[in-house]
Every structure is written in C-alpha cells, then in structure tokens.
Image (cartoon, rainbow, N blue to C red):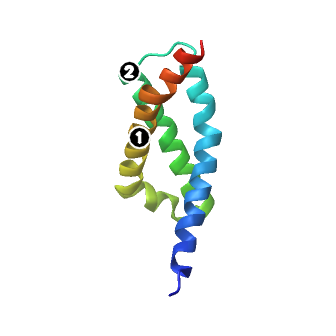
Amino acid sequence: MGYDGYIPYFLISVLLFIFYLIFAAPVQYFLNRNPKRFNAKYLLIYIFFSFLVWLFFAFITDPKNTLNFLMGYEIYLFSVSFAVIFWIWDSVFLQNIGRVAA
C-alpha cells in the first residue's frame, strides 16, 4: 500500500499549524489577560486572524491565484471553522488551566 498521497495533506497541516502558532498564540495571550468564556468579541477576533492565516497561506502557496482563492467559499468556511474550534478550545480548556494555575 502506498501512502504517498497523504504527504501533501501532512505538509499542509504542518504549515497551517505553524502559521496558527505564529498568529494565534500572541492573540490568545493578549485575550487571556482578561479571560471571558465564549465571548462573541473574542470569536470575531479569532475569525479575523484565522482569515489572515488562510490569506497568508494562499499567498505563500500560489500568489497568482490568491484573488481566485478569495472568490471561493472555502477560505471563508475554513477561516470560520478553524476560528470556532480555536475559540471553543480557548474558552473551555485554556481558560480553565489558567484559573487552576492561579
């Protein structure tokens, strides 16, 4: 069995993880100075930065087709879904860890 077809998905996942780490960790640190669970304003901030990550990813991978990527629904679907996942992760798990440590 050949698993070579999974290598691009793995590389894309690693790149996106690095981009999210670079963009989201400072945002999360900033927002958790005054933590609020399931705050809609925090969700909007996460969506904005998630969109920046996907835009940066689109520009890095194919600069000529970035405009076409913006015209498709995928960037918006991925941006919002990743932001919601990150927002839930932050609201449920990370803010509880901060309260336990304090």
Residue depicted at x 48% and y 21%: 96
Q: Which three-letter amino acid code belongs to the residue tagged 2?
A: Asn
Query: Quick one: 69 or 21, which is closer to the camera?
Result: 21
Location of residue 62 (image quadrant): bottom right
SS at mark 2 in the image: loop
Quarter of the picture containing the C terminus is top right
From where the camera sits, is residue 59 visible? no
Position of residue 1 relative to residue 51, above or below, is below
Position of residue 100 relative to residue 23, above or below, is above
Residue with the mark numbered 1 = 85
CB within 8 Å, label 2 to label 1: no
Location of residue 88 (image quadrant): top left
Q: Which three-letter amino acid code belongs to the residue tagged 1?
A: Ile
Q: Is residue 63 left or right of residue 45?
A: right
Q: In this view, does 53 lie to the left or right of 70?
A: right
Query: Quick one: 61 or 31, which is closer to the camera?
Result: 31
Residue depicted at x 48% and y 43%: 51
Residue with the mark numbered 2 = 39
**Could you tell me residue 54's position as x and y percent?**
51, 50
Query: Quick one: 65 or 20, which is closer to the camera?
Result: 20
SS at mark 1 in the image: helix
Q: Distance between the residues labelled 2 and 1?
A: 14 Å
From where the camera sits, is residue 16 visible? yes
**Could you tell me residue 38's position as x and y percent?**
37, 23
Of the image marks 2 and 1, the number of the one nearer the N terminus: 2
**Could you tell me residue 99's position as x and y percent?**
52, 15
Q: How crowded is mark 1: few (under 14 residues within 10 Å), some or many (20 or more)?
A: few
Residue depicted at x 56% and y 19%: 98
User: Where residue 4 is drawn, which disc sits there?
Assistant: none
